[in-house]
Image (tube, rainbow, N blue to C red):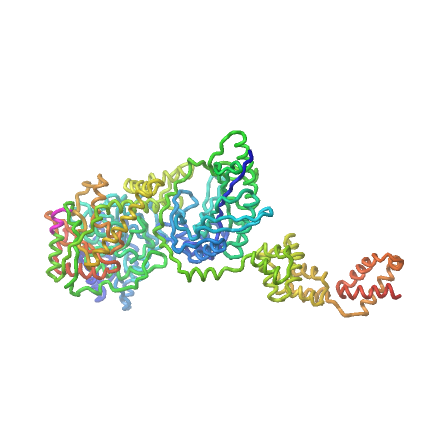
């Protein structure tokens, strides 16, 4: 069976019509994972036993006619989402042996559907990075070109979908960590509105920005997954009380008259020409479909990366303090508490994580707080205001997902500032709590996927899925050769 | 040179909520180590705090009883520091927007009325406990206390003696107990006090260098620590030495303070808003409902006892100085509405037995209804007043009702003239010498003869009846 580019709808059909059983489907994926994963390195942990067990249970539900949309569907889960009894490492030596005694809220919801867990996917350590090359356990490669990065931090989740070793996956997005790897690996990923999906059980990077979301082969599949994982959770006070809705409800509706804004700052010289050309061609397609293109400006974009790195690092510095070797995780040595904590953290964290902790603590230090942290919060308000203004005159915003296509492994990782600047297209969405979807809109001369992002009003994921689907319907994807 | 102390307090009080402040674990005291904690309060990765609204209600009550302004908008911050008893390595607390701001409490200290200003009251979570095992050379962490809601009451530096501080501490402790906000059990660490103290010349407008004595958990420790610090700082200044700004620990055994850390070692807590807990906005209606729910405070109760029940100010003070006693009194008068004799018997007899350790208010063997019945029996002449004590002791021992005890021990007053007359005759016959003395004018032996009669009667006749019969016999025959 060909597992590449499989959509959840197709798999649902195969399972429901008994063309294939859930254990058979699971077996196919496990077989291919064993074959492909050593090359792609998308998974940190493959949960074969767990997968087969849940596939058998799922089959019983299918046989008794009680199948739900995800019953028997194999999925991959980013390794910062807690899974009861399954190692959850955040790709860090610090949590190398950490087995959570509880499921994240999203995992509970998937389990209630009877999903099949294939494994835990690699990521940048503690989700800090855009290359998945800071992973301690699996430096994932791009299925389109194994010498290139898959993006990050959800690089494992994007790569396994792209390589056909999972039909869909969950990732998390703090500053672009779902959208940018989706773009690099030629798949579709959505960062929901902040509060749409419970963060309970997501190991926090930056609490005010983190959001779990799906990565899949189509906008529709993202909607199918979002339908399951969204909703209020009493264990996450920041989760929204917005009632559940069918995020795929607007699929197929005409986008005629839809106003799509193109903020000029996203199409500046710092974005590669190939990328610009491709995204602008997509804009043209939308115009042909009857949408109306609107010029606009997000002038504070130039400050966005600075604001993002201050806020996210400050929160990260505090969130990661709990990894002190006392309760779980790597335990260092020393004659006193202080020595032991210091040794645990020195050995447990990689360089990028340490860099962010230093940056964050610096920004929060007395004497610097006003100049850095408070300033960043003021910028956040400014960015929110500018987006509000754009949404006065447009329904969605179209931007490139990243300034470049996937770059070569080893090319950028040595220059942290250059890496940080590459987040320019994605971070404002998290700062403003907005939803955004990235889907492939073209390919570069060297056949690497180019992604575009659609940004929507708060809680308007349905329009994003509608618009992304409308584009995908007329777009011919070029599968990779993995 | 006369040195004058200036003192400010930070008091931590644990709230009486059923569950912890950010998770659903029990907030009760004690328990097997780490039996009252969950992934949230033990800081497992991925878990999130969810604010217990009851704790917010309680701090608002605390604010109202200390005449504070309640913020309409309040939010939470993280206080970051590493310590093994703090599993998240940050404490959720409140920095710029506490729930309560600027209040005041009036006290009487050494006969003088004073007003203590409150700077702020904020809500935070307690940390766990470390148990050090010196023989094994290990420290063990118990997280049961992690996440118990705490309020921190910060006063202005309005105290000038240990007596001021003790008067204030006792007053707010009682008020918090009355409000049902904190149980005030000092032996369980429900209230802990940090004391900031400095000395300066009297009349000087500049304050001296202050020291902070941490974690005093009894009024006695507070008093001794302040007295010791005044003595120590006075010695330093008078010898021309400098007081160093530092944090001190008070040693209960030696009665002395010792340095924990100096100003240079002070933490930078890197406070910032906690992104996991949305700010709260209160409406006037919500605040009004909470205010209306605050029970009567000790001062108001005391005045009611004096004015309505005509109880003496001294007895009213004793009754209201312990919430449990006052509540017991309230429960008793609900059953038998005769406050004065009830108050007297509580103050004289019940309190005595409690102070002797024969009774424990936390674990009363009898109900307020039984106690009410006991007083009623005496007041309506069913038993003698002296027998109240006898019956109370048996109620304390066995929990039996006063009627049962009176039955079993035959303590009812009987309208039995024959028995009375026979008893008096027997006593007079047995004590001819005393009878002789009485008749020759030494009337003070009358008391002795009364006593002899009562000894035999054991309350079976009322004292008035005994007296009447005895007088008649002595004079008449």
When asked about the image quadrant of residue B367, the answer is bottom right
Horizontal relation, residue B202 to residue A178: left or right: right
Query: Measured from the top left, where is residue A137 in percent x and y?
Result: 27, 44
Q: Is residue A208 visible in this depiction of the protein?
A: yes
Q: Is residue B229 visible in this depiction of the protein?
A: no
Query: Measured from the top left, where is residue A24 in percent x and y?
Result: 23, 60
Question: Toward the viewer: B468 or A132?
Answer: B468
Question: Toward the viewer: B448 or A190?
Answer: B448
When asked about the image quadrant of residue A433, the answer is bottom left
Read off the magenta span.
Answer: A271-277
Query: Measured from the top left, where is residue A204 in percent x and y?
Result: 32, 50
Considering the whole magenta stretch, tell me its main secondary structure: helix
Q: Would you say residue A101 sits in the magenta stretch?
A: no
Question: Toward the viewer: A11 or A468?
Answer: A468
How many discs appear?
A: 0
Horizontal relation, residue B22 to residue A313: left or right: right
Horizontal relation, residue B230 to residue B339: left or right: left
The correct choice, above or below, for B421 with respect to B162 in the image is: below
Taking the view exactly as shown, the residue that stands out farthest to the top is: B240
Query: Measured from the top left, where is residue B209 in percent x and y?
Result: 48, 36
Give the position of the N terminus of chain A as an image quadrant: bottom left
């Amino acid at each position: 069976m060909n597992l590449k580019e499989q959509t959840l709808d197709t798999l649902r059909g195969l399972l429901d019509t008994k063309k294939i059983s859930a254990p058979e489907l699971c077996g196919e994926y496990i077989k291919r994972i064993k074959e492909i994963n050593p090359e792609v390195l998308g998974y940190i942990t493959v949960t074969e036993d767990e997968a087969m067990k849940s596939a058998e249970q799922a089959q019983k539900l299918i046989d008794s006619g009680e199948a739900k949309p995800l019953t028997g569907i194999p999925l991959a889960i980013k390794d910062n989402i807690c899974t009861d009894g399954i190692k959850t490492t955040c790709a860090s030596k610090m949590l190398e042996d950490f087995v959570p005694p509880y499921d994240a809220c999203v995992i509970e919801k998937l389990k209630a559907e009877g999903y099949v867990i294939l494994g835990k996917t690699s990521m940048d350590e503690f989700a800090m990075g855009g290359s998945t090359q800071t992973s301690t356990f699996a430096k994932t490669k791009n299925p389109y070109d194994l010498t290139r990065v898959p993006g990050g931090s959800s690089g494992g989740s994007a790569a396994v979908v792209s390589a056909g070793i999972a039909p869909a996956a969950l990732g998390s997005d703090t500053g672009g960590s779902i959208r940018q790897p989706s773009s690099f690996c030629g798949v579709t990923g959505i960062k929901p509105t902040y509060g749409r999906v419970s963060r309970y059980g997501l190991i926090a990077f930056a609490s005010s920005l983190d959001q779990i979301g799906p990565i899949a082969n189509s906008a529709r599949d993202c909607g199918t997954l979002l339908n399951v994982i969204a909703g209020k959770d009493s264990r996450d006070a920041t989760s929204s009380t917005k009632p559940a809705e069918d995020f795929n409800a607007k699929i197929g509706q005409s986008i005629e008259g839809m106003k799509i804004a193109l903020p000029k700052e996203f199409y500046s010289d710092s974005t590669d020409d190939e990328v610009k050309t491709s995204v602008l061609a997509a804009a043209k397609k939308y115009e042909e479909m009857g949408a109306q293109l609107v010029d606009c400006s997000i002038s504070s974009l130039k400050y966005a990366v600075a604001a993002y790195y201050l806020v996210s690092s400050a929160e990260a510095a505090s969130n990661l303090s709990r990894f002190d070797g006392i309760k779980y995780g790597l335990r260092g040595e020393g004659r006193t508490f202080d020595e032991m904590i210091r040794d645990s953290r020195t050995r447990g964290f990689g360089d990028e994580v340490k860099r962010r902790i230093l940056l964050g603590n610096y920004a929060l230090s007395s004497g610097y707080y006003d100049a850095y942290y408070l300033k960043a919060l003021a910028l956040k308000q400014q960015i929110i205001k500018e987006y509000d203004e754009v949404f006065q005159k447009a329904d969605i915003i179209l931007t490139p997902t990243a300034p470049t296509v996937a770059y070569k492994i080893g090319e950028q990782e040595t220059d942290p500032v250059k890496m940080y600047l590459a987040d320019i297209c994605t971070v404002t969405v998290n700062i403003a709590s907005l939803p955004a979807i990235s889907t492939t809109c073209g390919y570069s001369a060297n056949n690497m996927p180019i992604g575009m992002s659609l940004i929507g009003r708060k809680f308007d994921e349905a329009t994003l899925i509608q618009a992304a689907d409308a584009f995908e319907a007329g777009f011919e994807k070029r599968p990779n050769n993995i | 040179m006369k040195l004058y102390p200036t003192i400010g307090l930070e008091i931590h009080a644990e709230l009486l909520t059923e569950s912890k402040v950010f998770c659903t674990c029990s907030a009760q005291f004690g328990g097997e180590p780490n039996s009252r904690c969950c992934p949230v309060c033990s800081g497992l990765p991925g878990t999130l705090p969810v604010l217990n609204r009851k704790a917010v209600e309680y701090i608002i009550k605390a604010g109202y009883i200390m005449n504070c302004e309640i913020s309409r908008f309040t939010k939470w911050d993280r206080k970051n520091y590493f310590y093994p008893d703090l599993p998240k390595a940050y404490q959720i607390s409140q920095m710029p927007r506490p729930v309560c701001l600027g209040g005041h409490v009036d006290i009487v200290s050494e006969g003088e009325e004073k007003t203590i200003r409150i700077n702020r009251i904020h809500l935070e979570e307690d940390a766990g406990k470390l148990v050090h095992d010196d023989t094994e050379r290990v420290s063990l962490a118990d997280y049961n206390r992690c996440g118990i809601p705490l309020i921190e009451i910060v006063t202005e530096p309005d105290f000038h003696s240990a007596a001021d501080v003790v008067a204030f501490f006792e007053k707010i402790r009682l008020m918090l107990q009355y409000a049902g906000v904190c149980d005030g059990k000092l032996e369980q660490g429900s209230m802990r006090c940090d004391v900031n103290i400095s000395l300066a010349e009297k009349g000087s407008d500049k304050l001296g260098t202050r020291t902070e004595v941490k974690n005093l958990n009894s009024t006695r420790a507070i008093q001794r620590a302040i007295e010791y610090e005044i003595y120590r700082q006075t010695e330093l200044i008078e010898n021309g030495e400098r007081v160093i700004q530092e944090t001190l620990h008070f040693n209960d055994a030696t009665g002395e303070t010792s340095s924990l850390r100096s100003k240079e070692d002070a933490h930078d807590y890197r406070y910032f808003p906690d992104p996991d807990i949305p700010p709260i906005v209160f409406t006037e209606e919500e605040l009004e409902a909470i205010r209306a729910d605050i029970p009567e405070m000790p001062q108001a109760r005391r005045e009611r006892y004096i004015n309505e029940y005509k109880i003496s100010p001294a007895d009213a003070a004793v009754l209201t100085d312990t919430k449990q006693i006052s509540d017991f009194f309230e429960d008793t008068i609900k059953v038998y509405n005769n406050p004065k004799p009830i108050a007297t018997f509580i103050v004289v007899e019940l309190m005595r037995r409690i102070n002797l350790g024969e009774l424990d208010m936390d674990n009363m063997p009898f109900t307020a209804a039984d106690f009410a019945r006991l007083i009623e029996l005496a007041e309506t002449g069913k038993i003698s007043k002296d027998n109240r004590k006898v019956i109370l002791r048996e109620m304390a021992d066995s929990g039996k009702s006063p009627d049962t005890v009176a039955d079993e021990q035959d303590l009812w007053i009987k309208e039995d003239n024959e028995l009375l007359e026979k008893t008096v005759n027997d006593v007079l016959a047995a004590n001819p010498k005393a009878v002789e003395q009485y008749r020759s004018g030494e009337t003070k032996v009358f008391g002795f003869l009364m006593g002899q009669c009562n000894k035999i009667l054991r309350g079976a006749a009322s004292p008035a009846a005994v007296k009447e019969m005895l007088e008649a016999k002595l004079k008449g025959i």
